Structures are given as structure tokens and as C-alpha cells.
Amino acid sequence: MNEMDIILEFDKNMKSLNSGINPLRKCVMGYYGEVLVANEFKKRGFNIQKKGGQAGYDLIVNGMNVEVRASEVKIERAFPKKITAWGWKLQTRDKNKNPKPIKYDFIILVKLDKDWKNHQLFMFSKKEVEDMKYTYFRGYQTVARVIYLFTNGIEEAINPENNKYDMITSQCIEFNKNPSSFLIDWDKFSV
């Protein structure tokens, strides 16, 4: 059994506890995303190092700092319960609510299906993230920038009645209208 299979089996067991509501699953999902992305880079012959910890990025790929964030479909507290999405934190805030510096060159967003066996990889550069407006929702006090990919399209989510916390940026709208244009571009990591 390889590392990814072990993680998938562990997650399956976690889902059976407390109706899938288990804080450990989020950590496991993050680690699974890192392993998945590292394996994708290795398959393509890239030189990678795992960093992790508090570095502000997870991998070094051909000298570039890469952060990895994984998400499965969920109900986001900033929207009504009828709206589901994959959501990724792109930048965090410090204890004084100031945005922390972005230490990665690229962030790779892992979109996982329900059982984590199928995925898509999207990417944003540091500059693309820095060009996004800050968001603030009392329920996500440590989040400075965030992006969503909605399951039923963005139209319902951008309705002012549903987007009362103004969590949807222009980049989020662009991402939802044409997600394939944000799929990972492996050439950006070639030296």
C-alpha cells in the first residue's frame, strides 16, 4: 500500500466517525494534497523538496516556493447553506488582523472529489493573489484572501442576498467562469 492509499484509507475511517465532522480530516486532507502535488511534479521529472512547517510554503520546485491547499466540496459559513463550493485560503492574517506576507511564488489549489480519488490542480502566482482584494468575514478572522469554486455556478453566489459579506472577488468570478484557464501550467516551473 503506497502513501496515498494509506491516507485515503485513513480518511475513509475518519468519515465514519461523527458523520465525517472531524478536525483531523482537514489536516489529513492538507497533507494528502501536498503528497498528491509532489507526486505530480515527480512524475514530470521536476526536482522537488518538501518544506512544510511554518515556512509559508510546502514545496520547493526547481528553486520556486510552492504552497499547496486542498479542498473538498463544503458548505461555507459566509454563504447560505444551499450554496456549496470548494474554497481555498490564499493568504492569512496575523493576530492583529494584518495580512501576513506571502512567502510562496505559486499556490496550487487541489480540488478533490468526494472520495479524494479524482482531483484537478489549479494555480495562481503570488502576483495574481496580491492583486486580489482582501476579504473579511467575522467567521474567518485569520483569512485575508480566499477564492471559491462553486458547484452550481457563481450566479447564485454573487446575488447580493447570498454574498452579504462580499467574499467574492473579480478573480473569483473569472475563476468560476473559466476554471480550465487556471489549471496548473507545468511549464512555469521549468528552469
Image (spheres, rainbow, N blue to C red):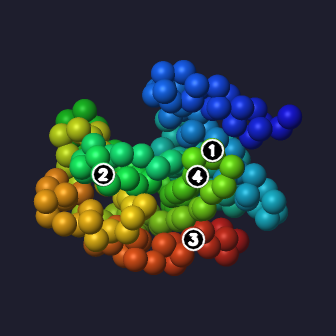
Q: Amino acid at mark 1?
A: Asp
To which residue does mark 3 refer? 183
Residue density around tag 4, few if under 14, some if 14–19, many if 20 or more, within 10 Å: some
Q: If you read the primary sequence from the N terminus, does the residue marked by circle 3 or circle 4 appear first?
A: 4
Whether label 4 touches label 1, CB < 8 Å = yes
| Residue 68 in picture, x, y percent from top left | 55, 50
Q: If you read the primary sequence from the N terminus, does the residue marked by circle 2 or circle 4 appear first?
A: 2
Q: If you read the primary sequence from the N terminus, does the residue marked by circle 1 or circle 3 appear first?
A: 1
Residue density around tag 1, few if under 14, some if 14–19, many if 20 or more, within 10 Å: few
Q: Residue 60 — which label?
A: none
Secondary element under disc 1, as helix, strand or loop, is loop
Q: Is residue 51 visible?
A: no
Which residue corresponds to the image point at 47% horizontal and 66% vertical from the top-left?
Answer: 124
* Residue 15 sits in quarter: top right
Closer to us: mark 3 or mark 4? 4
Secondary element under disc 3, as helix, strand or loop, is loop
To which residue does mark 4 refer? 113
Quadrant of image for the C terminus: bottom right
Q: Amino acid at mark 4?
A: Asp
Residue density around tag 3, few if under 14, some if 14–19, many if 20 or more, within 10 Å: some
Q: Nearer the viewer, residue 92 or 79?
A: 79
